[in-house]
Image (cartoon, rainbow, N blue to C red):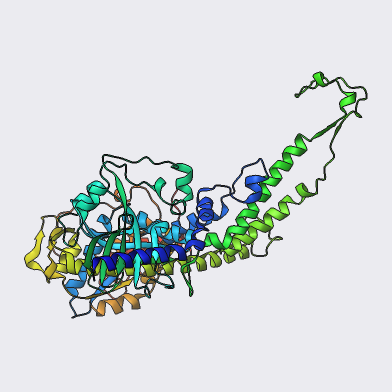
């Protein structure tokens, strides 16, 4: 396409998108204010002197993010071009041991996951850009969180999947632009640098007011420019078949390349709070709870002003009956008046508003908690039957909170699956240098039969493998493990381990069935995890390496204690009789299936 035609086209796209999102963009200031606790409701900001913000809604979101995105995602890759178990294992290891640990542009990988979830609950959606990262210490895929004000979606498109293009604006420095000059597809860099020579460039403060967040307006209202290394706004339009980078201000095309991901997809992934059928921005928690949050803030500030009036009520003074020079404010002051208690009187005010504060406040808190799928046990059940501290109320809280967490976790996992699929695609087409990974002993055993020539095994049983592109260069499917990012309850795992030990020791048929299939249960490892799960300090000092004893002369094997099956018979699977008996005693002390001793 001719360059003049192309620059006119992408600039028109930018203008159309900018105009289309104006109405929704006008709501972002309020949401950002709620995130940082800045009062903006009309009553609190303009009609009261008390400036108190009750961060209920923000706290609900922070807590949900902490529960939903507590752990690194886990999943499995499957080669779809052919059944290759070895390639599957390698790709899984690359993701877990290499990509997730090094995809730290902007922030660490897990910090970005949490922020992606957080800002989706604030705005309704959070957009991310997935691309290849080539730094000194890391070559691999990565993703970047995109400030929502710098994103310009295609007008009319209600999802990334149905979008033909998506524009992202950013500020780039002179040094960054100079580093692009020798890269394929880049052009007109010298022309652009010449145009900004001697200027301080463009800062966030120079952008349109709608492009600056409420946080920037409060914390960094005036960002100075830098004549030595000026910045300039450049915009990239991502299409499914090509990427176009341009300067709208100087009407220059800076890059035009075919889609380097070679997947006919936009490199943009959206994480929604609640997706909508007719808007790409979705519905967030702040939008749903804004009016209730405003009402809570207004009520608190009006109440606090009312308390001040009740402590220091206005006075009605008859100026003809009072010596003005004698009026002094303070305890034990003396005024000169003609008629005491007549010329100076306290203004009588109705206490009705103050008396109804608690019931109104409880009602608003209950409504806010209900719309967020949680509740507050400090509120009386008379306000809402689902509130309070009764066992029934607590169970209801857990079910409702779990349902909302489950929805948000599902949306997060959908986005992480898309991001990881793009990671895998980039690894298979762009990896240049071999990836070196250290392996544990069991991982060495898994890969040794597939890649014996590429493994370097150490004396300790551990090893290292260098993965080259041709070792993994096939197509893959990826499935995330549901719930892998969510916060785990250690008590649940501890109870599960207790149940496994109880059932295994009391049901010989289970172990016998495993023995017939050549399998066994490692009771030593099971017991070690049980101790660690109980929160015992220094478990390695309890379970220690066994000291080898001199072998006894060959003879008759010792007989097991009375009542215990012989070692090696079904139901024991090689477990030492004393250990088995001790574990059964532990189960009886802890209440069998129900109890777990707690560590102090």
Q: Is residue 385 above or below residue 59?
A: below
Is 184 on the left or on the right of 411, as rendered? left
Q: Residue at x 34, y 47 (%)?
A: 202
Query: Which quadrant does the N terminus fall into?
Result: bottom left
**Quadrant of residue 454 within the rendered picture:** bottom left
Measuring from the top left, give residue 80's x and y in whole percent. 22, 79
Q: Nearer the viewer, residue 101 or 165?
A: 165
Measuring from the top left, give residue 495's x and y in whole percent. 43, 63
Is 331 on the left or on the right of 216, as rendered? right
User: So how many labels did they put on this image?
Assistant: 0
Is 235 on the left or on the right of 359, as rendered? left
Q: Is residue 178 above or below residue 140?
A: above
Is 43 on the left or on the right of 546, as rendered? right
**Quadrant of residue 487 within the rendered picture:** bottom left
Asked whether residue 135 is in view, the answer is no
Q: Nearer the viewer, residue 216 or 7?
A: 7
Residue farthest front in this picture? 4
Asked whether residue 166 is in view, the answer is yes
Q: Residue at x 49, y 74 (%)?
A: 278
Measuring from the top left, give residue 237's x and y in whole percent. 31, 65
**Quadrant of residue 161 within the rendered picture:** bottom left
């Amino acid at each position: 396409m001719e360059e003049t035609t192309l620059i006119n086209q992408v600039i028109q796209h930018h203008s159309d998108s900018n105009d289309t999102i104006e109405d929704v963009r006008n709501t972002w200031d309020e949401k950002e204010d709620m995130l940082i606790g800045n009062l903006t409701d009309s009553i609190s900001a303009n009609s009261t002197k008390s400036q108190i913000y009750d961060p209920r809604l923000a706290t609900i979101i922070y807590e949900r993010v902490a529960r939903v995105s507590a752990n690194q995602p886990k999943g499995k890759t499957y080669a779809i071009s052919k059944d290759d178990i070895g390639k599957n294992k390698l790709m899984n290891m690359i993701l877990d041991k290499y990509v997730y640990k090094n995809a730290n542009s902007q922030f660490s990988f897990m910090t970005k996951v949490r922020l992606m979830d957080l800002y989706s609950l604030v705005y309704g959606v959070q957009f991310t850009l997935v691309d290849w990262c080539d730094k000194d210490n890391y070559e691999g895929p990565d993703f970047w969180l995109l400030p929502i004000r710098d994103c310009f979606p295609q007008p009319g498109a209600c999802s990334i999947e149905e979008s033909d293009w998506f524009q992202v604006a950013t500020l780039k420095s002179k040094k960054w632009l100079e580093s692009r000059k020798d890269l394929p597809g880049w052009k007109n860099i010298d022309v652009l640098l010449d145009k900004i020579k001697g200027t301080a460039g463009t800062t966030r403060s120079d952008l349109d007011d709608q492009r600056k967040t409420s946080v920037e307006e409060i914390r960094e209202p005036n960002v100075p420019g830098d004549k030595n290394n000026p910045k300039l706004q450049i915009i990239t339009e991502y299409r499914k078949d090509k990427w176009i980078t341009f300067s709208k201000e100087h009407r220059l095309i800076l890059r035009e390349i075919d889609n380097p991901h070679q997947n006919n997809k936009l490199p943009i992934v959206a994480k929604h709070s609640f997706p909508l059928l007719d808007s790409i921005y979705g519905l967030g928690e702040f939008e749903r709870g804004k009016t209730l949050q405003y009402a809570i803030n207004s009520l608190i500030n009006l109440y606090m002003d009312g308390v001040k009036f009740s402590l220091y009520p206005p006075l009605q003074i008859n100026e003809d009956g009072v010596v003005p020079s004698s009026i002094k404010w303070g305890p034990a002051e003396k005024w000169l008046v003609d008629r005491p208690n007549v010329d100076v009187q306290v203004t009588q005010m109705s206490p009705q508003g103050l008396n109804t504060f608690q019931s109104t406040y409880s009602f608003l808190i209950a409504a806010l908690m209900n719309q967020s799928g949680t509740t507050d046990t400090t509120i009386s059940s008379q306000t809402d039957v689902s509130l309070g501290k009764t066992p029934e109320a607590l169970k209801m809280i857990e079910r409702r909170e779990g349902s909302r967490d489950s929805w948000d976790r599902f949306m997060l996992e959908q986005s992480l699956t898309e991001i990881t699929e793009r990671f895998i695609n980039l690894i298979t087409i762009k990896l240049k240098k071999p990836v070196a990974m250290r392996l544990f002993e069991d991982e060495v055993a898994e890969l040794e039969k597939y890649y014996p020539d590429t493994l370097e095994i150490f004396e300790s049983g551990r090893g290292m493998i260098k993965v080259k592109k041709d070792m993994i260069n096939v197509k893959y499917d990826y499935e995330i493990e549901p719930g892998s990012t969510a916060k785990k309850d250690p008590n649940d795992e501890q109870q599960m381990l207790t149940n496994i030990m109880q059932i295994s020791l009391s049901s010989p048929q289970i172990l016998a069935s495993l023995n017939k299939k050549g399998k066994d249960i490692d009771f030593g490892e099971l017991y070690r995890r049980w101790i660690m799960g109980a929160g015992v300090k220094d478990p390695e000092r309890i379970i220690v390496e066994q000291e080898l004893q001199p072998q006894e002369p060959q003879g008759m094997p010792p007989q097991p204690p009375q009542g215990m099956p012989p070692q090696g018979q079904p139901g024991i699977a090689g477990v030492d009789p004393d250990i088995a008996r001790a574990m059964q005693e532990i189960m009886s002390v802890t209440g069998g299936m129900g109890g777990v001793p707690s560590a102090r």
